[in-house]
Image (cartoon, helix red, strand yellow):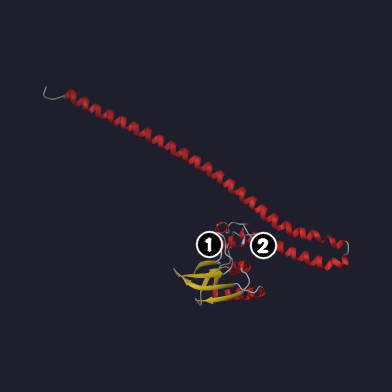
Amino acid sequence: YKVPTALSEAIHDGRQRVALVALAGALVLFVSLWWLVARAERTLKAQRTQLIEAETLAAMGELATGVAHNIRNPLASIRSSELALDSPAEHAEDSARDILREVDRLSARITELLRLAHQGPAEVQRVPMGPLLSACVADHAPAFARRGHALALTDDDPGAAVMADPTLLRQVVQSLLANATEALAADGRCQVRLAPAAGGRVLLEISDNGSGIAPETLAQVFRPFFTTKPKGLGLGLPFARRFVERLGGQLALDSAPGRGTTVRIELPRA
């Protein structure tokens, strides 16, 4: 009678039942959580698929609109050359020049589209920045001078070089310079500056004292086919940022109405 056998057995059975109930509860909780996570994952996948489809359709719509707008205008000019059929001797030369000019515009637009969509490996090589910038500034100096604008180059990092495709890098710089001269008013100025950057990088700044960009417009300038120019395609800045990022660099744009625009490009030093 001094050994509580029945009580010990009851306690032992109670412990087993509590353990079984706890195990069953944990199993039920695990299954419930697994089902919730699986359901959430399926929902997220479905929503992601719908989002990708919506973005794809939106991008296709923007692409179709941009291409149609930029091809229709040159085609309309070419089509208007039919007036030369009425009096060939009077209009033949002017019509031929118009056709050549508009065909060149079409070719330039198609080149920009192909350049933006380029996925293959670029011809990367060591590119000295000083000579490349000097050549770009020399090419654009007459256009700046005709509009009464000043264009200057400051090289604070002599001998700086980067690993890039020289042709594409030159196109990026020329596109940014073209944007600058179009944004300048009379007696405007543009400053191109090459300088060392933190982390052993090369900094390229292109600054102008133009009218600047409004905040609502600044938030969209890197969207393909977004442009405020009557004859622009809206691919210059998107292509520039994509090209710079493919090289492991960064492109930032700082602008505000009334204080001009500055484009900063940082690239790894070769």
Q: Which residue is mark 1?
A: 245
> Residue at left 36%, top 33%?
27
Residue 218 left/right relative to 37: right
Q: Residue furthest bottom?
A: 158
* Residue with the most extreme left position: 2
Instruction: Report the front residue among 230 and 119.
Output: 230
Residue at 49 percent of width and 73 percent of height? 195
Amino acid found under the numbered disc labelled 2: Thr
Q: Position of residue 84 (x, y in %)?
A: 85, 63
In the displayed structure, does residue 60 sit left or right of residue 33? right
Q: Amino acid at mark 1?
A: Glu
Q: Residues within 10 Å of mark 2 (few under 14, many from 20)?
A: few
Label 2, label 1: how far apart the Cα atoms are: 20 Å
Q: Quadrant of the N terminus?
A: top left
**Quadrant housing residue 261:** bottom right
Apparent side of residue 262 relative to residue 79 in the rendered image (left or right): left
For residue 221, what is the image quadrant? Answer: bottom right
Is the residue under label 1 in contact with that under label 2 (CB below 8 Å)?
no
Residue 176 visible in the snapshot: yes
Q: Nearer the viewer, residue 124 or 236?
A: 236
